[in-house]
């Protein structure tokens, strides 16, 4: 079996596990988002702001992926939502079987929205379907506007791109129009939001998007 | 052949190619640095500042790794040094055979220092020896001080960690002492430098380190 064969088998096994997850989430009418970005782009900070805004109205939960440390799950549990940390050891991404396993062993209870925060990595998580409704790519303004064309696969696959840390825009040379043009070229019809977890910019719009997608999923199911 | 067998064979083949590169660099007395960080941590900006400071005194060259775009090599060529871009397609890291291949097909001329800027990724490049003298991990202050313990392998393997974007320290909550403690725990005896390519902070110290390591390599060879 060659390297290519092994990779194809891994992705094929993952697709099977992801399909089972998707059926499970359809049965419970749970909207599932798979958040992907570089390390330190602000995935957990965005989720903290989201929990503060939505947890009174919706039942939220999170699965956190990291190589090491329980830190991200602890940050979300501190805000009162169920959050389970998957430690991948050395692995650079979450796969569908890890998510299934986590849900079997750690009951997060009935959820309206499940956030899966992937390992910080703009490359490897892109190929692994986790049974999500859609992928969300995050891009912080401090990373530079050249990243979509340098990492095209994730920005093509993500239905939503969230630009983060907009409060730092005055201190860095981030060309928003340039980033926006690249994202639109890679994902025609996709959505881009500009946010700051510090100032709250764009958080209402982001939460509105989540509520709309949840309503659409439930409408489609009924 | 299982997934584990395939991975072991890949790493074993890589080690063979890396040993050949190391012999080649020893013969030419070229100091080689393998720079690894998240996307957007400022690897190319650090190299630009390094080229401005050192290119009058040393013969510098660069190999740039990216999924897509020639942008980073173009930025360095614009400063007058030879730079070759390796496009990895979908691959999340450089391997030693790619570096060998690049040096065969694109002669960078005689070099005192070769910088290999890896694909932006804190995980996958860690396992691939490229024949370098040492690995350099970059951590920008905007990423947060929790990253060393979240991505321990690279901070353990890197002889030098360069904290970047120190000019943004006033605008973010980055605990330098905390980061420094994690890095020292993961790599006892390693070196940590705090830099800004914008203000020039730490660049002289960084360039001094490169000149010292080059002198030490040449001293050891003579």
Image (cartoon, coloured by chain):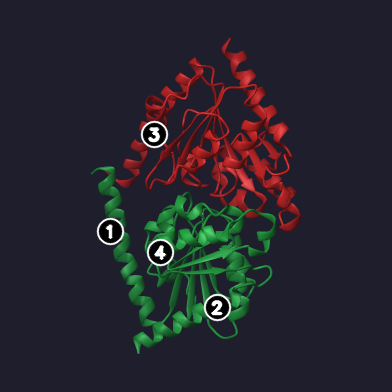
Chain colours: A green, B red
Query: Could you say which disc has been placed on residue B137 in the image?
Result: none
Q: Is label 2 in a helix, a strand or a loop?
A: helix
Q: Is residue A115 above or below residue B136?
A: below
Co-location on one chain, circles 3 and 1:
no
Q: Position of residue A90 (x, y in %)?
A: 47, 49
Q: Position of residue B92 (x, y in %)?
A: 43, 46
Q: Is label 1 in a helix, a strand or a loop?
A: helix
The front one of B81 and B112 is B81
Disc 4 marks which residue?
A187
Rate crowding at label 4 as few (under 14), some (14 to 19) or many (20 or more) other CA atoms within 10 Å: many
Rate crowding at label 2 as few (under 14), some (14 to 19) or many (20 or more) other CA atoms within 10 Å: some
How far apart, in angstroms, are the residues tagged by discs 4 and 2? 21 Å
- Residue at the image point whose x is 52% and y is 74% from the top: A61
Q: Is label 3 in a helix, a strand or a loop?
A: helix
Disc 2 marks which residue?
A207
How far apart, in angstroms, are the residues tagged by discs 2 and 1? 33 Å
Disc 1 marks which residue?
A12
Q: Residue furthest left?
A: A1
Residue A65 visible in rendering: no
Q: Position of residue A161 (x, y in %)?
A: 49, 65
Tag 3 and tag 1, C-beta contact below 8 Å:
no
- Residue at the image point whose x is 55% and y is 35% from the top: B78
Disc 3 marks which residue?
B98
Rate crowding at label 1 as few (under 14), some (14 to 19) or many (20 or more) other CA atoms within 10 Å: few
Q: Is residue A16 above or below residue B96?
A: below
């Amino acid at each position: 079996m060659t390297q290519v064969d092994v990779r194809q088998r891994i992705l094929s096994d993952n697709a099977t596990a992801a399909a089972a997850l998707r059926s499970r989430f359809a049965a419970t009418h749970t909207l599932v988002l798979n958040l992907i970005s570089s390390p330190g782009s602000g995935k957990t900070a965005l989720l903290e702001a989201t929990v503060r805004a939505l947890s009174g109205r919706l039942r939220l939960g999170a699965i956190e992926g990291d190589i090491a440390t329980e830190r991200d799950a602890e940050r979300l549990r501190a805000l009162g939502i169920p959050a389970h940390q998957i430690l991948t050891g050395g692995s650079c991404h979450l796969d569908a079987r890890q998510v299934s396993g986590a849900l079997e062993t750690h009951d997060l209870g009935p959820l309206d929205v499940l956030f899966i925060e992937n390992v910080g990595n703009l490359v490897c998580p892109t190929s692994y379907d986790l049974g999500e409704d859609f992928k969300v790519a995050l891009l912080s303004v401090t990373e530079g506007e050249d990243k979509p064309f340098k990492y095209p696969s994730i920005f093509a696959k993500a239905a939503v791109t969230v630009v983060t840390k907009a409060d730092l825009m005055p201190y860095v040379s981030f060309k928003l129009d340039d980033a926006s043009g690249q994202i639109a070229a890679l994902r025609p019809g996709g959505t881009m939001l500009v946010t700051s977890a510090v100032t709250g910019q764009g958080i209402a719009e982001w939460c509105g998007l989540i509520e709309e997608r949840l309503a659409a999923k439930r409408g489609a199911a009924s």
